[in-house]
């Protein structure tokens, strides 16, 4: 039984998530079935929304997987290559709520002060005063047309994406986007390919839908095109603008090769434009989709890093070849995001606030990025190599001397530092510490790196 305390300062869904996570790590094994959302809500006298939020977080972090019409099950935790390592280090895993850490270097966080709250409140009031919103009917399952128009303009002007509002589908975030793509392509493309190392959620979603999974190595220019050619993948997932987690930017020549390979085998490319808006040392790289002349690229993005992860708004640009399949699917009838949130965001973009916010957020995080980089160099000196910098919300570092990764995790835990290692979420042989700076103030970056330096040096062999 879990101890769910209503009067605790920690939200109920976080309490449930933390205790279930620890239970999975310490007492459960791969394939164990979790209680249904309804039964958990009844057992602990909490709302189904609370249980769903906890399960969603466990799913997003890879602890559980969802099987259609069967429920939730404990997953393999990480890629097959990392299972033994993760099991051997379980006692060192996190047992403290994130808000109780002295410093949390989460690699995908925005600072609460960065959200344009005053403008958002004003636009919210304006939208809710609009009597033309019909709260008595079902909204457009594809997403509100005003928002799709604004996203199409944004993608065309700043990302070089060739699309119309009719090709855009609004989703409730990254996982929802992948699930929709998997459901639309499972009959056409039974074999799925992805980068290794790469984002662990991608392979989990496509496995749930019955795809065969091919892992394709990442080279200095992104996905290895020769290994792609030798694979059986009919649909592939790539992060060409800022490869996750290595940070490699795929050059135009490699992008064209990948498009040609997938065109020749009548397949599709999922382009996740990961971190594309947050470039600090160069101009944003135009999308791969803009190079596509064969209608092969499925482009997806979210507002999680550019505006707020709490809004739960993502979008897909479907190739015209898949639009008919989408229109004929049950998925097209059900809206994935709140109608009011969509309308507020559409107004936010239409009035030019999003463009100004992007400039503001880039400037803030450029300063934090440079401060984190310079402080790491000053504190860790020649014991550290920067593997990835110049974009996103984290700098990835690697030791230049023999190193005990398990000791680093244990000592960080003891020191109240929340750290994130690349291999735990991406598989393969690439390992690095992901030093997130977006959710920290400049003062916290200085103090946090000072504290981290002590455990870093203690982990050198």
Image (cartoon, helix red, strand yellow):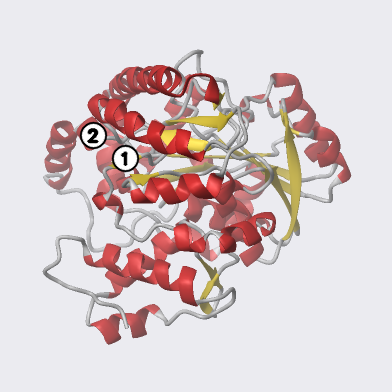
Residue 127 spot, x, y in % from top left: 18, 42
| Left/right of residue 251 with respect to residue 411 in the rendered view | right
216 shown above or below 188? above
Q: Residues within 10 Å of mark 1 (few under 14, many from 20)?
A: some
Q: Is residue 213 left or right of residue 409?
A: right
| Quarter residue 449 falls in | top left
Percent of width and height locating residue 14: 29, 62
Q: Which numbered disc flags the more N-terminal residue, 1 or 2?
A: 2
Q: In terms of depth relative to the viewer, which is nearer, 79 or 110?
A: 79
Horizontally, residue 299 falls left or right of residue 140, namely right
Q: Quadrant of the C terminus?
A: top right
Residue 137 image-quadrant placement:
bottom left
Is residue 306 visible in the rendered structure shown here?
Answer: yes
Quarter occupied by the N terminus: bottom left
Q: Residues within 10 Å of mark 2 (few under 14, many from 20)?
A: some
Name above or below for residue 54 compared with residue 227.
Answer: below
Q: Which residue is mark 1?
A: 308
Q: CB under 8 Å between callouts 1 and 2? A: yes
Q: Going 35% across and 39% down the picture, which residue do you hit?
A: 109
Closest to the observer: 341 or 98?
98
Q: Nearer the viewer, residue 256 or 444?
A: 444
Residue 187 % position (x, y): 72, 62
- Residue linked to disc 2: 115
């Amino acid at each position: 039984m879990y101890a769910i305390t209503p009067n605790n300062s920690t939200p109920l869904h976080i309490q449930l998530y933390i205790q279930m996570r620890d239970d999975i790590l310490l007492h459960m094994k791969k394939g164990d079935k979790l209680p249904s959302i309804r039964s958990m809500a009844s057992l602990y006298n909490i709302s189904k929304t609370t249980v769903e939020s906890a399960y969603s977080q466990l799913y997003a972090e890879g602890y559980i997987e969802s099987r259609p019409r069967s429920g939730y099950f404990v997953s393999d935790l990480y890629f097959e290559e990392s299972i033994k390592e993760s099991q051997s280090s379980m006692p060192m895993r996190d047992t403290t709520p994130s808000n109780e850490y002295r410093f949390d270097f989460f690699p995908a966080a925005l600072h609460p002060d960065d959200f344009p709250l005053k403008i958002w409140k004003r636009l919210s009031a304006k939208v809710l005063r609009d009597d033309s919103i019909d709260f008595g009917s079902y909204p457009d399952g594809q997403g509100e047309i005003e928002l799709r128009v604004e996203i199409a303009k944004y993608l065309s002007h700043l990302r070089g994406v060739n699309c119309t509002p009719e090709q855009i589908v609004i989703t409730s975030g990254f996982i929802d986007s992948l699930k929709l793509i998997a459901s639309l392509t499972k009959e056409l493309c039974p074999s799925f390919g992805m980068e290794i190392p790469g984002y662990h959620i991608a392979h989990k979603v496509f496995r749930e839908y019955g795809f065969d999974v091919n892992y394709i190595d990442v080279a200095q220019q992104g996905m290895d095109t020769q290994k792609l050619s030798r694979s059986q993948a009919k649909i592939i997932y790539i992060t060409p603008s800022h490869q996750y987690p290595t940070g490699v930017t795929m050059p135009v020549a490699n992008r064209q090769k990948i498009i040609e390979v997938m065109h020749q085998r009548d397949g599709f490319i999922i382009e996740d434009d990961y971190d594309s808006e947050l470039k600090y040392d160069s101009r944003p790289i135009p999308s791969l989709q803009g190079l596509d002349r064969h209608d092969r690229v499925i482009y997806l993005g979210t507002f999680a890093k550019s505006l707020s992860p709490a809004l739960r708004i993502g979008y897909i640009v479907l190739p015209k070849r898949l639009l008919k399949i989408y229109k004929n699917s049950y998925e097209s009838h059900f809206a994935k995001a709140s109608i009011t949130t969509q309308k507020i965001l559409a107004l936010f973009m239409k009035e030019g606030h999003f463009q100004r916010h992007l400039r503001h957020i880039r400037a803030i995080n450029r300063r934090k990025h440079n401060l984190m980089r310079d402080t790491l160099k000053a504190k860790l000196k020649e014991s550290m190599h920067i593997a990835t910098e110049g974009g996103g919300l984290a700098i990835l570092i690697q030791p230049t001397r023999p190193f005990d990764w398990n000791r680093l995790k244990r000592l960080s835990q003891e020191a109240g530092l929340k750290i994130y290692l690349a291999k735990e979420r991406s598989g393969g042989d690439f390992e690095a510490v992901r030093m997130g700076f977006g959710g920290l103030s400049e003062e916290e970056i200085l103090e946090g790196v000072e504290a981290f330096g002590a455990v870093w040096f203690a982990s050198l062999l």
